[in-house]
Amino acid sequence: MKNISIEEFISGMPKAELHLHIEGTFEPELMFEIAKRNGKQIPYESVDQLKKAYKFNNLQEFLDIYYAGANVLITEQDFYDLTWAYLSKVHQENLAHTELFFDPQTHTDRGVPFGVVIKGIRNALEDGKEKLGISYKLIMSFLRHLDEAAAFNTLEEAMPYKDWIDGVGLDSSELGNPPSKFERVFAKASAVGFRVVAHAGEEGPSSYIWEALDVLHVNRIDHGNRAMEDMDLVDRLAEMQIPLTLCPLSNLELKVVQHLKDHPVVKMMDKNLLVTVNSDDPAYFGGYMNANYLGVAKALNMSKEQLAALAKNSFKASWLSDKEKEEKILLVDAYLKAH
Ligand code: ADE
Ligand code: ZN
């Protein structure tokens, strides 16, 4: 074991990200640049002033600013630049694989065609695979504050691009919008061959996690923090090894936890839950993958073995093939042994 710092250990460790909204990677500098070239106004005078607005008391306060920011994205090049900026950043953090969300309705509702959005994102992802060696899966997420008909419409719009989409998800305002609202859309998406995931138990109750499992038949839960309030649910998640994609800095910034010391990640690992660490919306929450790992590592005094277990979980819980998963897990094991 070399005596390297925990920062260096985390930074060099191969890892996968499974919960990332591409619109949530929109850094203020790029937002101003794209707004300018599209002749769009941002209601803030400067990057600094915009950053000062990033103080949230709950999920909705964040979503209002996040959707406003996304409004300046218009052209295929905009979506390419957004995605490329994310990939360049995480490349420096030794990210090997990413499974990212995009929210088509945020753009199609403003008149930006579905094809423009997905082509820009996909071209950057393909370039990232080729030039940076980052593999990827793409997840189309439905906005749960909108109705079922709108989600069906989006599923229809996605059909010409079906082969570019690996799964569907469910995000946006959780409280009052239970998974069951989208039972039929998810049934159709599954029938078409998409994998299905859903945000549940971030702000919403543990019953939303049961619904995501039993009504939407998801094979992964995004967040899932509130599972810890229901030990029958914890047993079910552990037994089935349903992955939870946790997002520590997001939880802190959206007041899901009051302090990172209160974050459930280690307690969940102790309960044999398949948990992973992710960045959610890193441009808004103060950090990408390594900052999220470091946040919990420091607050919860985690060992290198525990951090490597999280990285191995990230591959185990991914949609890579069994062979690819095995290769990546061996890499993490070798990394741990060497450090
Ligand atoms: N969209 C982007 N980030 C989100 C989050 N943390 N929860 C729900 N919807 C989101
Ligand atoms: Zn999310």
Image (cartoon, helix red, strand yellow):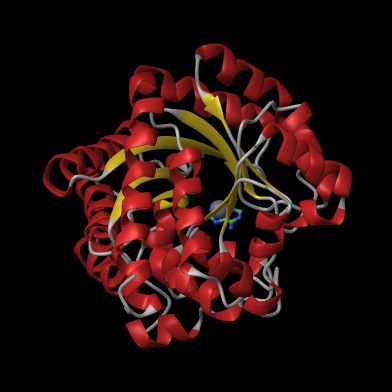
Q: Residue at x 64, y 23 (%)?
A: 185
Residue at far left of view:
131
* Residue 118 or residue 89, whichever sits in front: 89
Task: Please indicate whether residue 212 sits to the left or right of residue 153 in the image.
Answer: right
Q: Position of residue 267 (x, y in %)?
A: 71, 62
* Figure check: 3 above or below 17: below
Task: Please indicate whether residue 270 sits to the left or right of residue 62 in the image.
Answer: right
Q: Quadrant of the N terminus?
A: bottom left
* Residue 114 or residue 140, whichever sits in front: 140
**Would residue 110 be visible to someone looking at this image?**
no
Q: Position of residue 5 (x, y in %)?
A: 36, 80
Q: How many marks?
A: 0
Q: Residue at x 46, y 74 (%)?
A: 294
**Quarter of the view holding residue 183:** top right
Task: Please indicate whether residue 70 sits to the left or right of residue 124 in the image.
Answer: right
Q: Position of residue 226 (x, y in %)?
A: 77, 56
